Amino acid sequence: MKFQSLTGMHDILPDDQVYFQRVNKVVENVAKYYGFLKIETPILEQAEVFSKSVGTDTDIVEKEMYTFRTKGGDLVSLRPEGTAAVMRSYIEHGMHNLPQPVKFWYTGPFFRYERPQAGRFRQFHQFGFEAIGERNPAIDGQTIQMSYDVLKELGFKNISIEVNSIGDSECRPYFKKILTSYFRSRRTSLCADCQRRLKENPLRILDCKEEKCQRVKAGAPQIIDHLCENCHAHFKQVLEFLDELELPYTLNPYLVRGLDYYTKTVFEIVENSEDGKSQGSLAGGGRYDNLAKMLGGRDTPACGSAGGIERIVSIMKAREMKVGKDSKEDAQIFLAQLGQLAKRKSLKLFEEFRDSKIPVAESFSKDSLKTQLRTASKMGIRWVLIFGQKEALEGFVTLRDMDTGTQKEIQLDKVVEEMKAKIKAK
């Protein structure tokens, strides 16, 4: 029997790990700078954590969640997104008693049963920022800035922000009536899913990617024209923050995001082609002031964002964008050894280099000196420490300069210090 990974699941192989590590490191650095603390929530949650917050009539809950009963009869789901789980944790641990806002960041795997395609998997990875407990529009601006910073730091250049307000419980119901009236008169021009959405939540039609629905959407009423006074003032201040930050943004009156918990500000960061057309979202988010109450908590304002790591990595790889090297690639020293005694002593020497935080490459599984020297040459390493049977017995190491071919002997107890000096002098 030939085993393969499940459809939509994928291995992250060593060649890809450097990209994932790069993304995670940039996210961590940005998060720390802004005072966000790392949180990890379980991969399994009660199914209602998502059905109550994301929305029972969303594609995620209706079609995409991995939901099943445990042996004890509990209905659980593999997490399809991060925000609801973070808010559940905030409520469960009484974090409203902490100084507000409480700010989190996370990375990890998420799961949605959808049709796999380029850059989209059933098990995928996201990073996210969540700021809980603050209504000030400055938090919206900061969340957008952080997501933008991550992408810029990774090397994305032609990116811009699409932003909109979808109102709140005061102004959105009236807008839904207007929107329903508009789409009802054009019902036959909508796809089958959107005809169903018209009964359940007409806002979701604005999020449909079907070309026929896009044409109908183009003439739809805009919610920005129907915001209540509070939502209008909030959105105006968000835009003023974006102006002050000199972030490139455009108003997209039909941007809604697909989840029930969003209120007021929503945004996506998109990459644009040379002709100015959007090539798809890299990160997005918004304000979700109603989520805590949906999950049984007290009234708690919040704002957050998330980015899809696989999509970001696929673009970085396709464009051969610069990523950091791992410690082995950074190594300027190669430790070659011959014979069992030398191998044993080399392991100890290798640890001494590690204790001194000096990267050293090696090939302990190889016995041929010629093969090891060829490996060092391919890696572009200048200094090769040769540790053979004679060296192991007499307590020294032979240092070969690969640039000049010259060799010298160094006492074993002085190797680390001498090599440290050579690296600094380079």
Image (tube, rainbow, N blue to C red):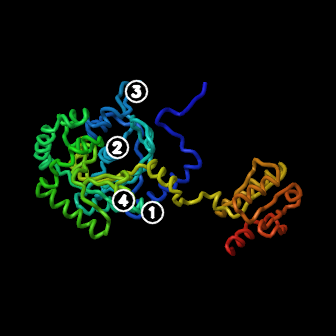
Q: Residue at x 39, y 25 (%)?
A: 72
Comparing labels 4 and 3, the label whose residue is closer to the camera = 4
Disc 3 + disc 1, Cβ < 8 Å:
no
Looking at the image, is mark 4 or mark 2 earlier in the sequence? 2
Residue position for label 2: 85
Secondary structure found at label 3: loop
According to the picture, the residue beneath numbered tag 4 turns out to be 275
Expressed as whole percent of the image width and height from the top left, the position of residue 68 reads 38, 28
Q: Look at mark 1 in the image and give the residue it sits on.
A: 153
Q: Residues within 10 Å of mark 4 (few under 14, many from 20)?
A: few
Amino acid type, label 4: Asp
Mark closer to the chain start, 3 or 1: 3
Q: Which residue is mark 3?
A: 70
Quadrant position of the C terminus in the picture: bottom right
Q: CA distance from mark 4 to mark 3?
A: 51 Å
Q: Secondary structure at mark 1?
A: helix
Determine whether the residue tagged by mark 4 lies in a helix, strand or loop. loop
Tell me the quarter of the picture where residue 348 sits: bottom right
Quadrant where the image shows the N terminus? top right
Instruction: Give the residue at x 38% y 32%.
Output: 66
- In 3D space, how far apart are the residues under numbered discs 1 and 2 (Cα atoms)? 28 Å
Quick check: 159 left or right of 57?
right
Q: Assess whether mark 2 and mark 4 are in contact (beta carbons under 8 angstroms).
A: no
